[in-house]
Amino acid sequence: MNILGIGGYSHDSAAALVVDGVLVAAVAEERLTRIKHQGGVPYEAVRYCLETAGLKPRDVDHIGCYMRPGLRLARRLPYRLIQGVLHPFYSAGFMAYEVAHNAEYLWKMKHLGAGKAQVHFMDHHPAHAASAFLVSPFDSAALFTIDYIGEFAATWTGVGYGTQIQPLRHKNYPHSLGVFYSAITDYLGFLRASDEYKVMGLASYGEPEFYDEFLKFIRPREDGWYDIDLSWAAWPHAPGSRVGYFSEKFLNRFGPAREKGAPLEARHRNIAASAQKVLEETVLRLARTLRKTTGEKHLCMAGGVALNCSMNGRLRRESGFEDIFVQPAAGDDGIAIGAAFQLHHRYTSAPRAFQMDHAYWGPEYSNAAIKRFLVDAKLPYEECQDIEDRVAQLLAAGKIVGWFQGRMEFGPRALGSRSILADPTRPDMKDLLNRYVKHREDFRPFAPSVLADRAADYFESSTPSPFMLFVDRVRPEKMAEVPAITHVNGTARVQTVSKASNPRYHALIQRFERITKTPMILNTSFNVMGEPIVNTPSDAIRCFYSTGIDALAIGDFLLIK
């Protein structure tokens, strides 16, 4: 049975293909169109998935979509009618958009399967949960999804047994932790709904000076859940660029919002730290409550907020769960996987036979295709018998190297297929990368890719982290050895690399260790700020020549400036 999953539509659209219970391909539309956070129908992603499996549109049996448009309208329109008393023009525009948007979504999805496939509109949060649980290593687990908003729910809990998902409890918009964190992102002068990771990075440079006051805003309840005091918020009735996302009450207390590009003050850093802490503490209480309620030893998480690595690190250390699985594409793009597997189990009643132990589900390019491109472009290159050894030597010499190998990653993290690599032992490397390659804010940290069997020597957790979704503490005695990946607060966003999941990347790190005695390399995504991660050889060459990258390893070929 061939099942296509569609993730996202308003933003971050993606497609995933499951054939007879096995994931075959998954890719975000943005990687193919080169438009960051591309929404709409992921036509290019669908085409890639079908071509990978050798299928035609008529071969697809079922299509699972990321949201139920009827339920979305039934929840959102009555809410907006009530809010229309305060802001009639905004509410009228919102309702017109919702009707048009959902009608377009419904019509386009219905016509996606060449008229043969049966189209299913899935419940948003259960599909999020399925994207993690149904591909996790756990037979049963507590389920936890947190995002901006689904049809109307924003925080959702449940439990999974075998192939079944049982909802337990949820919290509706506008009591949304995802909206709160996005609102903070907007307030601090970054792009709402795409720059939240900047707030997470900035938080480490501040002190949670306003945490106690933020607890008046995000109020903990005795049952382990939370309420949001909406008197601090503008998003329930009229959010947007014109009025912002916070009320006058918030602005009077914490000051005006930062203009984009303006200097970052201590106040901004402390607000980021306070917001991060209140998010972590709120989610930690929820997770502990879920652990007690379900009695489950394992936790599966998805939703955009599940990409907050600092929060995830605390959950792993303090929630009481023995292990946590976070799907690498935890945002709306990853629902493509959850929707497809839900339908597979629904229509086959088959037990689970697939586990997601890597994220390499995107396009790849053969050496022949890469060489043909390089020759046609008249680019000088070296064909290497041992590309791993050559790159390891370059890294040890202080060079910055673009690394383009194998199938592209699914999800926002570069995990050794479309990465920019550097030496983590050099104190100046973080500043060099931010200034000359990534062209981004100087407070942004970089991550280590470490050999899985050596991770415990450098980091306090010994749990595998193949998807770079958990922040861990660097061992104090190792901080001086790897300053380029050690954040200001002594932590790092760790990726553990095994030979089974990525043999070539694992071999590269081993070669680097032989030269430097350090079993890790610095890894950041192969792109510049504001652009998607590179996909094709052409994308890689363009990024290589327009930045301060010193060398490019693409397949078995090496280009050096």
Image (tube, grey):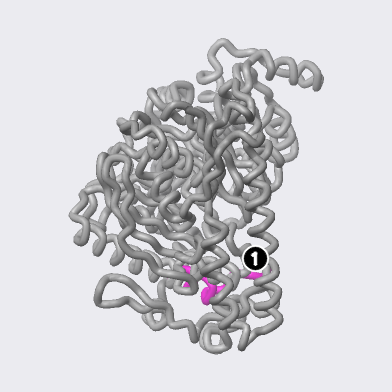
Above or below, 207 relative to 161: below
Which corner quadrant of the image does residue 372 belong to? Answer: top right
Magenta extent: 261-273
Describe residue 254's horizontal placement relative to residue 474 as left or right.
Answer: right
Magenta-colored stretch includes residue 323: no
Q: Magenta stretch: dominant SS? A: helix
Residue 280 percent across, percent down from the top left: 37, 64
Which corner quadrant of the image does residue 146 belong to? Answer: bottom left
Q: Residues within 10 Å of mark 1 (few under 14, many from 20)?
A: some
Residue 513 percent across, percent down from the top left: 41, 27
Above or below, 314 relative to 373: below
Q: Residue at x 68, y 23 (%)?
A: 559
Residue 470 percent across, percent down from the top left: 38, 49
Of 218 and 494, which appears nearest the observer? 218
Q: Residue at x 64, y 65 (%)?
A: 98
Residue 515 shows up from this direction: no
Q: Amino acid at mark 1?
A: Glu
Q: Secondary structure at mark 1?
A: helix
Residue 177 shows up from this direction: yes
Of 386 and 360, which appears nearest the observer? 360
Of 321 and 489, which appears nearest the observer? 321
Query: Would you name the residue on which mark 1 appears?
Result: 98
Q: Residue at x 40, y 23 (%)?
A: 514
Above or below, 112 relative to 275: above
